[in-house]
Image (cartoon, helix red, strand yellow):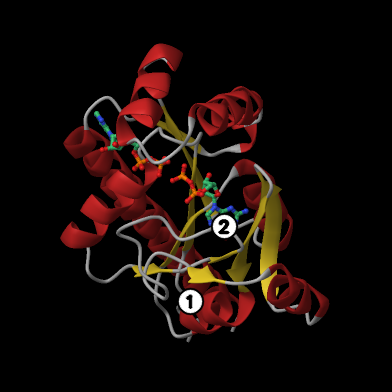
Amino acid sequence: MIEEKGILFILSGPSGVGKGTVRKALFERDPDLKYSISMTTREKRPGETDGIDYFYKTQEEFQELIKNNQLLEYAQYVNNYYGTPRAYVEETLEAGKDVFLEIEVQGALQVKENFPEGVFIFLFPPSLEELKNRIINRGTESSELVLNRLKEARKEIELMDAYDYVVVNDNVDHAVEKVQAIIQSEHLKRERIAKQYKKLLEAEL
Ligand SMILES: Nc1nc2c(ncn2[C@@H]2O[C@H](COP(=O)(O)OP(=O)(O)O)[C@@H](O)[C@H]2O)c(=O)[nH]1
Ligand SMILES: Nc1ncnc2c1ncn2[C@@H]1O[C@H](COP(=O)(O)OP(=O)(O)O)[C@@H](O)[C@H]1O
């Protein structure tokens, strides 16, 4: 019997493209998915909750997590650290549940080294102009931080080739449907491979 592990899905894309919005809408439709809540040193925004949006850590606490190898990946992004808790991801996948990460590109590339079998999805804006409008309209960043995020966006888009899928977030419902289709087809693909493997094993006996 082949053990059925969960699939690791990684959603990245430039700040403001709509990752959080698409992820939340996806989770409303797909309650079986497990979201890995990240650790960050960034300040909590109004409306965010510790343990729901992020686990908020001090610089010292974050350095301890790195030192103790408790992070699957981490990256510095616009002067703050962000990282994925290793134990949660590994244990949840082992339990046969799919895990969903929403992280920036540097971290996603680190995950690819450890989990090449992960499914990497890049959320793309309809245009850079629209991306800028979304960051400004969200109203959570000062104009300097908006500029920093747009600079990062250009760098992130250059690394898009490393991803398995690109989804344009023109409309939230469309984007969610496309991500759901990816999840479904990855499951079918793995089921097919597992069946072929089983046949091969039986033929050898
Ligand atoms: N590498 C990495 N990036 C993360 C993690 N959690 C969040 N991020 C990314 O860090 C960036 C900044 O996140 P945030 O400050 O919440 O800003 P926002 O995405 O603009 O709302 C985004 O691209 C997130 O996807 C993580 O655990 N690891
Ligand atoms: N398809 C979309 N069309 C229009 N606005 C969107 C769309 N997706 C997200 N937004 C808006 O863009 C802003 C940034 O979205 P958010 O999910 O916070 O992005 P990210 O997590 O990638 O930084 C929010 O104000 C959100 O409501």
Of residue 59 and residue 20, the one placed in the foreground of this image is: 59
Q: Is residue 56 above or below residue 91?
A: above
Callout 1–callout 2 Cβ contact below 8 Å = no
- The mark total stands at 2
| Depth check, front residue: 58 or 113 | 58
Residue found at the very far right of the displayed protein: 67
- Give me the residue at 48% from left, 36% from top: 15
Question: Compared with residue 165, is residue 81 higher up or lower down, i.e. above or below?
Answer: below
- Indicate the quadrant where residue 87 lies: bottom right
Disc 1 crowd rating (10 Å Cα; few below 14, some 14-19, many 20+) is some
Please state the horizontal and vertical placement of residue 103, each as a whole percent of the image: 54, 51
Q: Is residue 15 left or right of residue 69?
A: left
Whether residue 165 is situated above or below residue 150 in the rendered picture: below
Position of residue 32 in the picture relative to residue 141 (left or right): left
The answer as to whether callout 2 falls within 8 Å of ligand 1 is yes
User: In which quadrant of the rendered image does the C terminus lie?
Assistant: bottom right
Nearest the eye: 18 or 161? 18
Q: Amino acid at mark 2?
A: Arg
Rendering quarter of residue 77: top right
Q: Position of residue 19 (x, y in %)?
A: 39, 43
For marks 1 and 2, the one nearer the N-term is: 1
**Which labelled disc corresponds to residue 5?**
1
- Residue at (53% x, 80% y) in the render: 88
For label 2, the residue is 42
Residue 194, position as x, y percentages in the image: 47, 68
Secondary structure of residue under mark 1: loop
In the image, what residue type sits under mark 1? Lys
